[in-house]
C-alpha cells in the first residue's frame, strides 16, 4: 500500500508538472490537428482507391490507428524527459537520498508518461466522436465500435512508447541524440515487424489486427479490390465504398490477450530499466571534471592547533 | 548518534580523484565543511547522502555501514543538494507532498508536517503559489523544508547560500542555527562567513583531503598574533600580495588597508589585528597548498 502511494505521488507530481506547461498545450493542439486531419481526409485509411463509410467502427479504427502510429513515434519525443528533468533540477539527488526504490521511481515516471499520452489519445477519441457526427455518413453511433480500438489498439501501443522512453533514459548512451535517432528506426521496424516475420503476434501497434479484420471484408465487399491497405497522408482522390460494410474488429479473447500482453511487455521494460538505472549517481552517469592526481596520494591532516604555522612561501598563495 | 567517515576515497571515470582517504567522526552539532570550489565537498556530500558509493573506505551511521545498508541512513537523512532546482509548475505544498510520500510519511502526517515546516521557513502565505514564481531565497527555503520533512537526524546542506542576496543569506543562516540541536548538520560551503555564523565544528577540505578538523576557536588560535593591517598606496598592493598572504583589502582615503597573515609584522608600521575565521581559513589553505607543492603531490 505504501509502495503504491509512493508510485502515485511520483506519477502525480510529474504529470502535474508537465500538464501545466505551455508545451503541453502545444502537444494537445497537435492531437487536435491529427483529429482534424483525419476528419477532413488529409489522413485516411485506404483500401486501394476506396475508403469505408464513416461508421463508428470505421472512424474508431482509422482515428485510433492515426493515434497509434503518430503518438507512438512523436509521443516518445514528447515524454522522453521525465528522468532527465530530475537529473537537471537535482530533485533526483534528493530522491536518491531517500529509501525510494528504483522500481517505484520508474513505475511512477512510466505512469506519468503514459497519462500524458493517454490524455492526447482522449483528445483524439473525442475528435473521432465529433467526426462521425460532422461527417454524417452514418448517424448510428456505436460507442463500443468507436472507442474499443482506442482502448485495445492505441493504449497498449502508447504504453510501449511510454516504457521505451523511460528505458532509453535509463541507459546513458541512449539519453541523447543517438537514442532519438535510434527510436525512429526502432519504431519503423516495430510497425513492419509482423510483415517482416509473418507473425501477427509481433505487432505492438495493432495495425495488423485491423488489417486482418478489414481486408477479408473488403475482398467480399469491394469489387476488384486487391488487398491494398494503408494509412496515408492523402493527396489523391478517394472514393467511398458504399456497398462495403465493415463491422469493426472482433475483439476476441485472443486479440484482447495479445494486446494486454504488449501492456505487460511495457511494464517488463520498465522493470528492465530499473536494472540499468543509475539512481542519479554522477559516478555512473558522467565523468566529473576536476583536478587530477599526479603522484600517489599521501593523506595528511595538519596538526594546525597551534603548531601549524605553515604560512606559505612568498608568491605561493 | 554518530557518523564515522573512515578513509573514504572516490575516483571517477578517467582516474579523476575527488576524495583521498578522508576520515572524520561527527556527533550532534553543526559541522561547517569549508573548502574551495572543486575541493571534493560535493562528492563527500553525495557519498554521505548515499547517492554515490566510495571507491574505498566506508561510512558508518551509528555503526552500520551505509554502503551495505543505505536505508538505515536514508530514513533519517535530510539532504539539500547544491544548485537545487524545483518543479516550477507545482505549488510549494504539492512539491512537499510529493517528497513527503517518497520519504514514507502517511498523508495525515505529511499534511501536518508540511504546515509546520512552511511556518518555520516563513512560506505559509506562499504555500499555494507555483514554485516557478519564487525567488532564489524562497526556493532554498522550500529546499530546507523538504530536507526536514522526515525530521532527520542527519541534515546535509550543500552550498545552500550560493546565489542568495545578503539578506536571504542571513535569514538562511539563522534558520540553520535554529535547526541544530540534537541532530548532525553538515553545512558544506566555500563561504567562510556562513560557517562562522553557525558552525560548532569546522572541517577544511582541499584537493580531496581533510586539511584540518576542529572547533572554530582552535582554527583561530592557529593565526593568533599573525594578522596585521598594513596601509599601502594602491600601486604597492601587487608587491605586497607577492610577498605575503593578503586576506582582504579595503580602499580608503589614505591608501589600501590590507589584512596580511604573516609570522612577523610585514612592515614596521603594521598594526596587529584580531584574527577572523577567513584569515585562518586562507592561511590554512595556503599552508596546505605550499606543503602539497613541496611534496610534489600537486
Image: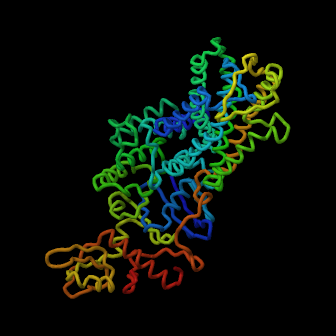
Q: Residue B45 location in percent, x, y?
A: 51, 58
* Rendered view: B167 above or below A33: below
Extreme-left residue of the structure: B253
In the displayed structure, B160 sits above or below A9; it is: below
Inspect this view and state whether residue B68 appears: no
- Residue located at (35% from left, 72% from top): B280
Identify the image quadrant of residue A217: top right
Residue drawn at 58 percent across, 70 percent down: B16
Query: Camera-side residue: A59 or B102?
Result: A59
| Residue sticking out furthest to the right | A198
Q: Nearer the viewer, residue A12 or B30?
A: A12
Above or below, A154 relative to B244: above
Q: Quadrant of residue A10?
A: top right
Residue B34 in picture, x, y percent from top left: 42, 65
- Residue B158 lies, in percent from the top left, at 45, 56
Residue A58 picture location, percent across and down: 69, 22
Residue drawn at (59%, 21%), measured in percent from left and top? Answer: A131
Amino acid at each position: 500500500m505504501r509502495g503504491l502511494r509512493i508510485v502515485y505521488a511520483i506519477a502525480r507530481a510529474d504529470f502535474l508538472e508537465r500538464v501545466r506547461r505551455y508545451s503541453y498545450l502545444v502537444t494537445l493542439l497537435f492531437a487536435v490537428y491529427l483529429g482534424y486531419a483525419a476528419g477532413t481526409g488529409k489522413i485516411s485509411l485506404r483500401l486501394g482507391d476506396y475508403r469505408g463509410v464513416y461508421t463508428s467502427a470505421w472512424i474508431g479504427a482509422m482515428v485510433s490507428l492515426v493515434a497509434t502510429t503518430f503518438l507512438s513515434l512523436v509521443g516518445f519525443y514528447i515524454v522522453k524527459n521525465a528522468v532527465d528533468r530530475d537529473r537537471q533540477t537535482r530533485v533526483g539527488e534528493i530522491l536518491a537520498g531517500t529509501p525510494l526504490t528504483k522500481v517505484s521511481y520508474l513505475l511512477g515516471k512510466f505512469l506519468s508518461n503514459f497519462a500524458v499520452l493517454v490524455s492526447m489519445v482522449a483528445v483524439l477519441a473525442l475528435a473521432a466522436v465529433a467526426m462521425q457526427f460532422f461527417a454524417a455518413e452514418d448517424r448510428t453511433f456505436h460507442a463500443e465500435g468507436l472507442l474499443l480500438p482506442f482502448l485495445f489498439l492505441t493504449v497498449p501501443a502508447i504504453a510501449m512508447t511510454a516504457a521505451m522512453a523511460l528505458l532509453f533514459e535509463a541507459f546513458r548512451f541512449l539519453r541523447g541524440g543517438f537514442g532519438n535517432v535510434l527510436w525512429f528506426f526502432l519504431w519503423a521496424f516495430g510497425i513492419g515487424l509482423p510483415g517482416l516475420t509473418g507473425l501477427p503476434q509481433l505487432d505492438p501497434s495493432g495495425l495488423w489486427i485491423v488489417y486482418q479484420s478489414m481486408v477479408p471484408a473488403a475482398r467480399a465487399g469491394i469489387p476488384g479490390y486487391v488487398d491494398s491497405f494503408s494509412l496515408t497522408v492523402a493527396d489523391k482522390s478517394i472514393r467511398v465504398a458504399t456497398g462495403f460494410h465493415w463491422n469493426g474488429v472482433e475483439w476476441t479473447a485472443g486479440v484482447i490477450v495479445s494486446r494486454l500482453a504488449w501492456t505487460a511487455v511495457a511494464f517488463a521494460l520498465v522493470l528492465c530499466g530499473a536494472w540499468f538505472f543509475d539512481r542519479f549517481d554522477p559516478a555512473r552517469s558522467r565523468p566529473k571534471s576536476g583536478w587530477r592526481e599526479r603522484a600517489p596520494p599521501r593523506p595528511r591532516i595538519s596538526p594546525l592547533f597551534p603548531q601549524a604555522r605553515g604560512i606559505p612561501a612568498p608568491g605561493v598563495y | 548518534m554518530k557518523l564515522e567517515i573512515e578513509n573514504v576515497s572516490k575516483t571517477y571515470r578517467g582516474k579523476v580523484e575527488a576524495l583521498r582517504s578522508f576520515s572524520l567522526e561527527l556527533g550532534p552539532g553543526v559541522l561547517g565543511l569549508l573548502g574551495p570550489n572543486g575541493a571534493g565537498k560535493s562528492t563527500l556530500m553525495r557519498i554521505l547522502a548515499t547517492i554515490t558509493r566510495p571507491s574505498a573506505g566506508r561510512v558508518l551511521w551509528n555503526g552500520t555501514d551505509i554502503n551495505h545498508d543505505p536505508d538505515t541512513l536514508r530514513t533519517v537523512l535530510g539532504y539539500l543538494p547544491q544548485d537545487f532546482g524545483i518543479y516550477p509548475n507545482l505549488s510549494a505544498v504539492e512539491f512537499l507532498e510529493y517528497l513527503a510520500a517518497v520519504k514514507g510519511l502517511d498523508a495525515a502526517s505529511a499534511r501536518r508536517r508540511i504546515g509546520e515546516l512552511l511556518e518555520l521557513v516563513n512560506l505559509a502565505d506562499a504555500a499555494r503559489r507555483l514554485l516557478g514564481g519564487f525567488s532564489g531565497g524562497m526556493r532554498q527555503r522550500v529546499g530546507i523544508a523538504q530536507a526536514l520533512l522526515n525530521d532527520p537526524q542527519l541534515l546535509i546542506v550543500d552550498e545552500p547560500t550560493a546565489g542568495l542576496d545578503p539578506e536571504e543569506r542571513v535569514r538562511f543562516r539563522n534558520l540553520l542555527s535554529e535547526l541544530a540541536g540534537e541532530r548532525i548538520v553538515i553545512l558544506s560551503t566555500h563561504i567562510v562567513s556562513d560557517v562562522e555564523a553557525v558552525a560548532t565544528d569546522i572541517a577544511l577540505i582541499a584537493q580531496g583531503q581533510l586539511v584540518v578538523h576542529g572547533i572554530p576557536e582552535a582554527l583561530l588560535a592557529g593565526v593568533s598574533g599573525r594578522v596585521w593591517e598594513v596601509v599601502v598606496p594602491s600601486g604597492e598592493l601587487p608587491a605586497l600580495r607577492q610577498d605575503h598572504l593578503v586576506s582582504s583589502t579595503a580602499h580608503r582615503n589614505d591608501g589600501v588597508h590590507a589584512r596580511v597573515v604573516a609570522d612577523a609584522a610585514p612592515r614596521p608600521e603594521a598594526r596587529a589585528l584580531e584574527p577572523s575565521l577567513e584569515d585562518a581559513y586562507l592561511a590554512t589553505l595556503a599552508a596546505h597548498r605550499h606543503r602539497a607543492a613541496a611534496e610534489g603531490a600537486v
